[in-house]
Amino acid sequence: MKIALITENSQAAKNPIIHEALTAVAGPMGHEVFNYGMYSADDPASLTYVMNGLLTGILLNSGAADFVVTGCGTGMGSMLACNAMPGVFCGLVIDPTDAFLFSQINAGNAISMPYAKGFGWAAELNLQDCYRKLFEGEPGAGYPKERAAIMATNRGKLADLKAASCHDMLTVLKSVDQDLLRSAIAGEKFAEYFYPNCQDDGIAAYLKAL
């Protein structure tokens, strides 16, 4: 699985901590982590939580990533921005129980975490525990197990509802503020990571034309 990490500007200084925790867990499981930044507090390609959501939509809808790990100070802004995108189902994960239940019940494709609120002593251990609970089991297996079937039905209905209420991603890209879009893909390693992994020629062509 291709996992993308996106860090918002107010928490950019913590990117190395988050990246190390994520790779420590996901790497041994056979997953590949792509760090889309921000890489430091003074990274010139600054990402707001709104841009986090837009970039998440681009990565997931193009097939460049299978899962996105993002966040902001509280995790809520990035979660809302992600869920505004077509095909993105993002949960707010604060502790390992959240991670486990989101994976088992919701089987989404993105999480948002708080990297300021409650981010204290041994925070990196909580991150690792969250990522472990998120990725170690089969997503959508259900909890409790006897409710697995109805949960799967509800996920399908939610996906249908989102498809009916959202434009496709290419239409979104053409409709949003183009300066916002350019800023969202201005990261140092965006082109290096995105274009070789992108599976949607239309999205790739549009972004290259910017």
Image (spheres, grey):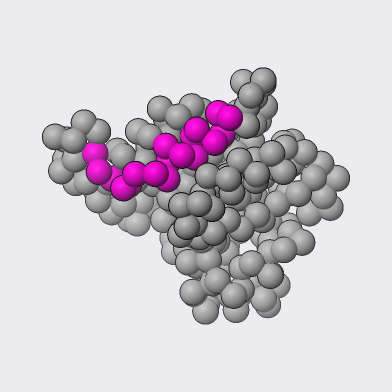
Asked whether residue 70 appears in the rendered view, the answer is yes
Q: Nearer the viewer, residue 38 or 96?
A: 96
Q: Position of residue 28 (x, y in %)?
A: 50, 51
Magenta-drawn stretch contains 136? yes
Q: Nearer the viewer, residue 133 or 143?
A: 133
Q: Residue at x 65, y 44 (%)?
A: 20
Q: Residue at x 64, y 67 (%)?
A: 193
Q: Where are the magenta residues, as a range?
A: 125-142
Q: Nearer the viewer, residue 49 or 122?
A: 122
Question: Image quadrant for the C terminus?
Answer: bottom right
Please give left or right for residue 42 compared with residue 16 in the image. Answer: right
Q: Residue at x 34, y 44 (%)?
A: 137
Look at the picture and state if 115 lies above or below 177: above
Q: Position of residue 75 (x, y in %)?
A: 57, 33
Task: Identify the main secondary structure in magenta.
Answer: helix
Magenta-drawn stretch contains 178? no
Figure label count: 0
Q: Residue at x 42, y 37 (%)?
A: 133
Asked whether residue 54 appears in the rendered view, the answer is no
Residue extending farthest front: 28
Look at the picture and state if 107 lies above or below 3: above
Q: Position of residue 120 (x, y in %)?
A: 67, 21
